[in-house]
Amino acid sequence: MPRNTVDLPYHVEHLSILDEKGQLDKELEPRIPDDLLLGLYRAMVLGRRFDERVLSLQRQGRIGTFAPTTGQEASQLGAVAALEPSDFVVPSFRETIAQIYRGAPMESVILSFAGYNESAFLVEKAKDLPNSVPVGSQVLHAVGIAWGIKYRKEKGVAMTFFGDGGTSEGDFHEGMNFAAVYQVPAIFVCQNNQWAISVPRSKQTRSKTLAQKALAYGMPGIQVDGNDILAVYAAAAEAVERARSGEGPTMIECETYRMMMHTTADDPKRYRKEEEVEGWRKRDPIERFQKYLKDKGLLSDEKIQAMESEVKEEIQSAVDHAEELMKKYNDPLEMFEHVYEEMPPYLEEQREQLKQELAESGQEETHG
Amino acid sequence: MAKMTMVQALNLALRQEMQKDDSVIVLGEDVGRDGGVFRVTDGLIDEFGEDRALDTPLAESGIVGMSIGMAIYGLKPVCEIQFSGFAYLAFHQIECHASRMRWRTRGRLTVPMVLRAPYGGGVRALEHHSESREAFWAHIPGLKMVIPSGPRNARALLVSAIRDPDPVIFYEPKAVYRAFREEVPDEEETLPLGKPHRVQEGKDLTLISYGAMMRPTVEAALELKEKDGVEAEIIDLMTISPLDDAMLVESVKKTGRAVIVHEAPRSFGPGAELVSRLMEKAFFYLEAPIARVAGFDVVIPLFSKEKAYLPGPQRILQAARKVLSI
């Protein structure tokens, strides 16, 4: 008869392994080698301390606007930890912690926040793409890379990151659709941090979950506790396995929280309540992971202490180095490079004009 | 009369138009509760409610496409694209529909919408937050492209843009947003779209600019007067397209010399069109080739080098002196 229910073989799972009180679901606990566990913990701490440090640099006017990451350590690291160095990460603009974990020197991050195109020189070998600021636009690039991987019969995967806001953009939907149609090895990691500047998740979409958007495109979607690094890792590892074995793309929604402002140019007090932030503070990703590692006997207060001071020193030396590099990278003529492979004659003329201008002004005035 | 920044003046324009006409709807990302990232829409949600200061999902094409529908229906949407560098996600809606609905329907349907977006460099921002791409829009038939230069004309031009029967791209120079204050009358004030403004009369040289570049242009003119005894005529275009060249032609016929200043890249920029118009209509009055002072033909560098990219008084002075020396 005409009004039958279409039987869709789909559902959305929610995965939580290590809850906010540090309680562990032993059956679901992923098998992760000890050194990787400790490495991830260290990366989380480094990410948090780095965020704090660059925020203070920004407040002192030593760097410009940037997008803080505090609170999203597990959501980012759990995902990229499941990748090989030879895979591709296609980030938005808040994946700083993941980028550092994947080998981007902290100096390059600081330099880019300080407005230096030269920051790109410091990221040489990575296959990962640079930040993409226009929201959601990078999703399609991951699909293109993944299509290439499939075409060349390689084993890699392309993992792209975007936020809850990004799921409203057309490019996100087009990317999901293409990936599913072509069954490419792409992984869509949504950093659902509940806020797109001032717009809450509830006003971004009426969907109950973001993960369910995957179902409309015919790919599996899973929602995970994004502050539970074990859950994020388990979901990512599963998606990587699926992608590598030729079974197509996956979307992972990490439910996390933007603990800080959207960028340093923003004041969240205008649109959200402090109590909400406090509630999420209790669900901190680092604290529960620390407890887990202590329970496992992998971490002690002394070790944590040592790690903290090590990380602090590492960050300090990156800041010092970045400030030295800023002095080195002070040539405005650099702006004419890399527009084309070959510089057109009129650009040469313009470059010459600026060169002369700089010589005449003793370079003082025109320097930023 | 109150002394206002451009942000406050734009806010006044929106507020008063919304008070007068309930078909005026402000929409965009963060324009409601947050009052816009630059606070241009501050307080509108409190005065007019969520339906008239509408926070949208994060989708530029969605914002513009929906505005087109609203305008066709009979409303007057004033949508905000948070930074002009994100307007390209809506390019096809503007090019394929907003600009040509009147043309396509032979006048049956029109799109009286305004797209507001901050543009330009000088505020130490991230990539995509500093560019000056007005030439894209000026190139599209059926669109109006307006750029104010100060608080008072920003308010008057925005009111006119909202009332205009055609789609208007309204670029706000973010470097000017809070740079200075001007007296802005509380009572209604409009400025006609498509008409430039003579900022200062002069007989020796015509300086033509708009938007954020008006300040260095005026500064250069002051120095020309003090150091060289040159009386420059200064014209603020205010509307880039459709371009009314009558005042420009008249001015160049008088001075015989012109310098055009914009921060948009030089090649195929608005200056190229201005030079062509002047060549066509005032060629025999020219004493020297017209000079363009513009952004270089590169992507505007990240902010540590943006000062070297942006035209400043020195670059304008140098061009002016060269033109005057011929």
Image (cartoon, coloured by chain):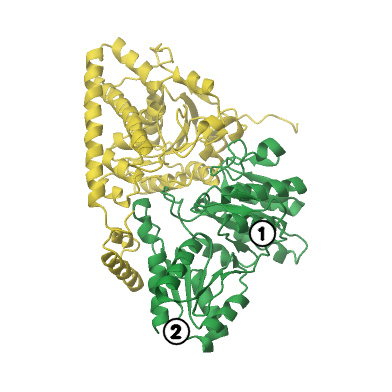
Chain colours: A yellow, B green
Q: Nearer the viewer, residue A298 or B47?
A: B47
Regarding residue B296, the answer to whether it shows in the image is no
Disc 2 residue crowd, few under 14, some 14–19, many 20+, Cα 10 Å: some
With B67 as the anchor, is B22 left or right in this view?
right
| Front tag of 1 and 2 | 2
Q: Amino acid at mark 1?
A: Pro
Q: Amino acid at mark 2?
A: Ala
Q: Quadrant of residue B30?
A: top right
Above or below, B320 against A68 in this view is: below
Give coordinates of residue B55: x percent, y percent.
62, 39
**Disc 1 and disc 2 on one polypeptide chain:** yes
Q: Nearer the viewer, residue A184 or B14?
A: B14
Give coordinates of residue A8: x percent, y percent.
60, 30
Q: CA distance from mark 1 to mark 2?
A: 37 Å
Give coordinates of residue B235: x percent, y percent.
55, 70
Which residue is found at the position 46% from the left and 44% from the top?
Answer: A139
Which residue is found at the position 45% from the left and 72% from the top?
Answer: B225
Mark 1 lies on residue: B167
Q: Nearer the viewer, residue B79 or B98?
A: B79
Regarding residue A152, the answer to whether it shows in the image is yes
Q: Nearer the viewer, residue B123 or B232?
A: B232
Give coordinates of residue B158: x percent, y percent.
65, 55
Q: Quadrant of residue B52?
A: top right
The chain containing the residue under callout 2 comes to B
With B197 as the anchor, is A230 left or right in this view?
left
Report the quarter where the C terminus of chain B lies.
bottom left
Mark 2 lies on residue: B288
Secondary element under disc 2, as helix, strand or loop, is loop
